[in-house]
Amino acid sequence: MSGAEPVANSKICLDKQGRRWGCGIMARNTFEELLTSRGVSCVPTEEAEAWTYVKCGKESLDVATDMIERGFAETR
């Protein structure tokens, strides 16, 4: 995601009651669902070291913004 740093798949979060849950897996699943169910396309925006950064979206949907709003990514 360009403009966002995704949550690691292995990250464990705490809910409001202090219970642990797999937020990293949920973030990955949400990202995959956004890409596959909404016909989103991604285009490369830059390359740095071993990474290729991309911008993904469709019409009014920006995947990075959506993932940040859900708490599954942080601004880069």
Image (tube, helix red, strand yellow):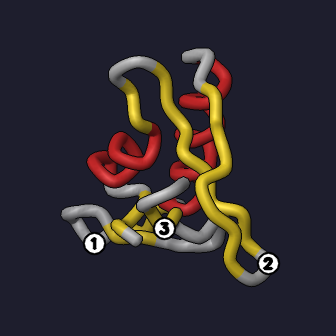
Q: Which residue is mark 1?
A: 18
Callout 1 crowding tier (Cα within 10 Å): few <14, some 14–19, many ≥20: few
Q: Position of residue 49 (x, y in %)?
A: 74, 83
- Element at badge 3? strand
Q: Position of residue 62 (x, y in %)?
A: 40, 36
Picture quadrant where residue 13 is located: bottom left
Left/right placement of residue 1 relative to residue 74 reads right
The N terminus - image quarter: bottom right
Instruction: Kindly report which numbered mark, 3 or 1, lies closer to the viewer in this rendering.
Output: 3
Q: Nearer the viewer, residue 73 or 56?
A: 56
Q: Which residue is mark 3?
A: 5
Who comes first in sequence, dot 2 or dot 3? 3
Q: Which residue is mark 2?
A: 50
Residue most extreme to the right? 50
The residue positioned 68% from the left and 77% from the top of the image is: 48
Residue most extreme to the front? 46
- Amino acid carrying label 3: it is Glu
Left/right placement of residue 51 relative to residue 55 reads right
The residues tagged by marks 1 and 2 sit, at their Cα atoms, a distance apart of 36 Å
- Amino acid carrying label 2: it is Ala
Compared to residue 12, the image places residue 54 above or below, namely above
- Element at badge 2? loop
The residues tagged by marks 2 and 3 sit, at their Cα atoms, a distance apart of 15 Å
Picture quadrant where residue 50 is located: bottom right
Compared to residue 23, the image places residue 55 above or below, namely above
The residue positioned 32% from the left and 47% from the top of the image is: 70
Compared to residue 16, the image places residue 29 above or below, namely above
The residue positioned 34% from the left and 70% from the top of the image is: 14
Q: Nearer the viewer, residue 14 or 76?
A: 76
